[in-house]
Image (cartoon, rainbow, N blue to C red):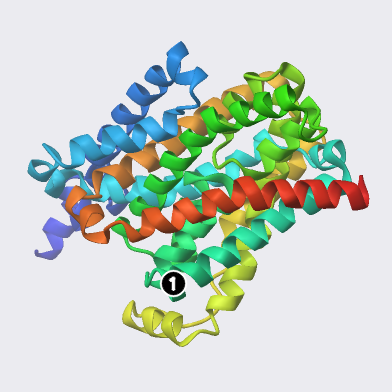
Amino acid sequence: MNTAAAHLNPLPATTAKGGTPTVARLRKLLPGLALTGAIALVSIQMGNIGWLQANGISALTLAIVLGMVVGNTVYARMGAVAGDGVTFSKANLLRLGIILYGLRLTFQDIGNVGWAGVAIDATVLCSTFGLACFLGTKVFGLDSKTAMLIGAGSSICGAAAVMAAEPVVRGRAEQVMVAVATVVVFGTTAIFLYPVLYHLNAQYHLIDLSPSAYGVFAGSTIHEVAQVVAAGRVISEQAANTAVIAKMVRVMMLAPFLIILSAYLSRTPEHKASALADGKKAGIVIPWFALGFVAVAGLNSLALLPAAVVRHVTDADTVLLAMAMAGLGLTTHVSAIRKAGMKPLALAAVLFVWLVCGGFAINAGITYLLG
């Protein structure tokens, strides 16, 4: 290009070809964002169906399932065009969604369950994750990443915890999907099992279990928030409210859990090798989105934001998380899950038994000591 031509066309070459680098990047993302957005909106609408709500099947679960259906059928023909946006959804939008998830919590929730409730949640979390790591690698022969992802989902808050732990653990899409699948299977089982156990106990007077105590038990041991709500409402509104509060305190432990996990993994040879393979330094991965999650929860605790604003942002957050789940589903192949075999499901089953039996023992013991 000569000088005269340069004066006539002073814009960058990328602009002359169709926009600035930012605009070009946005154009590459749009097809994938549109696809995950469409799946998310369909999932949210389906999540409003009464039967699905009553059975604790949330929009996030539906987004994963629909994403897998599309991902294993027609997505192969559009992956080249939509791939960037899909990756952006399951990585960047997920982090933003986790941060805004803090608007569902307040620090006052901790006071509502007391120190006993906090101790119960912390003990259930640590024992379940520890069991997952030990049994997953030593007994079932799973790789440590899959075991940790299954442990995160079982011990904290289901699919959201699995997705939040993925960048810290450096898990692959199929490992994440296997972990999410186990959460869906056993979390859904809990919706039906817990009320049955409550009514059997009430009929035979085995132990003294009030609706509030049942709520803490359900909130501290069932996987997903939606599943906790469903299992609580079957008993009573009081049980549901207590269950949700206990669950939210457990969710609040996600941030310190990720920081501690990252600090531990930074010292392991496997993590260092994985980081070097990715061309990154083998140090502590600070999950800034987890810190943002705590900061937003703290802001929400001050009650400075109007209720309408919180409601609208929470609705938007549901869309972001559903898009992230859709992105995960789109990039997960059924063949990868089949290849994983029955071992992940067996580990999740053992953890589920622990959550029901061991979790109840933890509830009873700590309530006796601190309640």
Whether residue 145 is situated above or below residue 15 in the rendered picture = below
The image quarter containing residue 2 is: bottom left
Q: Quadrant of the N terminus?
A: bottom left
Q: Is residue 86 left or right of residue 214?
A: left
Q: Is residue 26 visible?
A: no
Q: Please give the name of the residue rendered at 64% of the width and 48% of the height, measured from the top-left corner.
A: 357
Residue 83 percent location from the top left of the image:
21, 49
Residue 317 percent location from the top left of the image:
52, 34
Report the number of numbered marks: 1
Q: Residue furthest bottom?
A: 269
Residue 32 percent location from the top left of the image:
25, 40
Q: Nearer the viewer, residue 10 or 268?
A: 268
The image quarter containing residue 338 is: bottom left
Q: Is residue 121 visible?
A: yes
Q: Residue furthest top?
A: 50
Q: Quadrant of the C terminus?
A: top right
Q: Is residue 262 left or right of residue 83?
A: right
Whether residue 200 is situated above or below residue 156 in the rendered picture = above
Residue 358 percent location from the top left of the image:
66, 53
Residue type highlighted by circle 1: Val
The image quarter containing residue 309 is: top right
Q: Nearer the viewer, residue 335 or 168?
A: 335
Question: Counting other residues with Cα less than 10 Å from the Cα at mark 1, is it few (<14), some (14-19), or many (20 or more)?
Answer: few
Residue tagged by mark 1? Answer: 139
Q: Please give the name of the residue rendered at 43% of the width and 21% of the height, measured from the top-left corner.
A: 47
Q: Considering the numbered disc 1 on the image, is that residue within a helix, a strand or a loop?
A: helix
Q: Residue furthest front?
A: 204
Q: Is residue 32 left or right of residue 130?
A: left
Q: Nearer the viewer, residue 19 or 315?
A: 315
Q: Nearer the viewer, residue 59 or 308?
A: 59
Whether residue 288 is situated above or below residue 243 in the rendered picture = below
